């Protein structure tokens, strides 16, 4: 069982909360978060809208096909994404900040632009834009507590998020199948932290707590599942390390809904390295070196790497990028 942290206790005993937060992120990179202040009614609203969207006829979902978006926004059909070069068995919508396209964009600036919203569900846009704002507040609170727990000023990460943060929200449905075990393949998240909402009683999420040791992560009522991304690994020289995770495809006749929210800084932001106290620095493991999946200190470079690998059809259609090297997602 992963640690369960109660964010509401940070108001009354911040020191104890920060120690628990630091230890959970150092030891497993994953934990459950309760006491976050997001009401059950809000949770039911977004899960209900997700169910409504995925129940639409295929042509209504394809109205917002990601193939129409140079910014990698919108709907991907079952089998429309890759992780480690293998097909993920899920359908999903990708939602980012609603902004103008960057004229003559190069590289990761192509990720900035508008979203695609389903006309068949007029309530969808407002609900998920509000969800983005709410979870941004939760994530930034966690980041400030993390900074202090690591010996830095509370606002250490603030500048990276002050101007045009490049958050990402996914609305995901995994369909049951006996043809593959891969709902989404093993990967790490490329940003700062992830807040994951999953339906009650859903199955399939697994975390690699030690090499080859995969542990099931079932939902906890009212809790978000939180994990750190590669940029926090960079910021702490590996004292905090992003943890591999995957989702096993559901059993035939079942499915699984999840809504991950990725708290990411501005595309051109560099995460400032934290000078850890000596007692913590002694336990830093360094940033993991993988020549097939380099970790960059600028968020946009990580995101561009991940999006073009995960969606090679969009990358080729809109940006003329041919797959090269060993592919991996996120």
Image: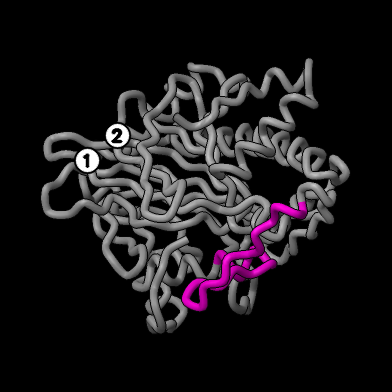
- Which numbered tag is attached to residue 250? 1
Would you place residue 139 above or below residue 75 in this image?
above
- Tell me the chief SS of the magenta region: loop
Tell me residue 127's x, y (percent).
51, 32
Q: Say which residue label 2 marks.
A: 203
For label 1, the SS is loop
Tell me residue 173's x, y (percent).
31, 42
**Labels 1 & 2 near each other (Cβ < 8 A):** yes
Question: How is the model colour-coded?
Answer: one colour
Mark 1 Cα shell of 10 Å, populated few (<14), some (14-19), many (≥20): many
- The reply to whether the magenta stretch includes residue 202 is no
The residues colored magenta run 281-303
From the viewer's perspective, tell me whether residue 238 is left or right of residue 213: right
Residue drawn 84% across the image and 44% down it = 151
Front-lying residue, 154 or 31: 31
Between disc 1 and disc 2, whose residue precedes? 2
Mark 2 Cα shell of 10 Å, populated few (<14), some (14-19), many (≥20): many
Front-lying residue, 255 or 123: 255
Q: Quadrant of residue 289?
A: bottom right
């Amino acid at each position: 069982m992963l640690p369960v942290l109660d964010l509401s206790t940070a108001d009354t005993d911040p020191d104890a909360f920060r120690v628990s937060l630091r230890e959970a992120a150092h030891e497993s990179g994953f934990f459950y978060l309760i006491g976050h202040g997001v009401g059950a009614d809000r949770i039911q609203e977004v899960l209900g809208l997700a169910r409504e969207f995925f129940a639409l006829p295929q042509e209504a979902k394809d109205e917002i096909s990601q193939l129409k978006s140079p910014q990698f926004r919108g709907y991907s059909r079952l089998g429309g994404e890759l992780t480690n070069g293998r097909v993920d068995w899920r359908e999903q919508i990708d939602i980012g900040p609603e902004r103008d396209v960057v004229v003559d964009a190069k590289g990761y600036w192509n990720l900035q632009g508008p979203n695609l919203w389903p006309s068949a569900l007029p309530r969808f846009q407002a609900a998920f834009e509000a969800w983005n704002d709410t979870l941004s507040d939760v994530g930034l609170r966690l980041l400030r507590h993390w900074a202090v727990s690591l010996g830095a000023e509370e606002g250490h990460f603030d500048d990276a998020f002050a101007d045009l943060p490049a958050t990402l929200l996914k609305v995901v449905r995994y369909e049951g199948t006996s043809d593959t075990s891969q709902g989404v393949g093993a990967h790490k998240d490329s940003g700062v932290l992830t807040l994951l909402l999953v339906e009650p009683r859903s199955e399939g999420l697994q975390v690699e707590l030690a090499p080859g040791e995969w542990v099931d992560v079932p939902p906890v009522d009212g809790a978000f599942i939180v994990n750190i991304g590669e940029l926090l690994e960079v910021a702490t020289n590996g004292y905090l390390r992003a943890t591999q995770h995957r989702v096993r495809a559901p059993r035939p006749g079942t499915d699984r809904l999840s809504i991950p929210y990725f708290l990411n800084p501005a595309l051109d932001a560099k995460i400032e390295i934290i000078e850890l106290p000596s007692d913590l620095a002694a336990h830093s493991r360094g940033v993991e070196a993988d020549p097939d999946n380099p970790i960059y200190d600028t968020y946009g470079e990580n995101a561009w790497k991940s999006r073009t690998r995960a969606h090679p059809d969009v990358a080729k259609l809109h940006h003329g990028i041919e797959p090269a090297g060993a592919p991996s997602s996120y």
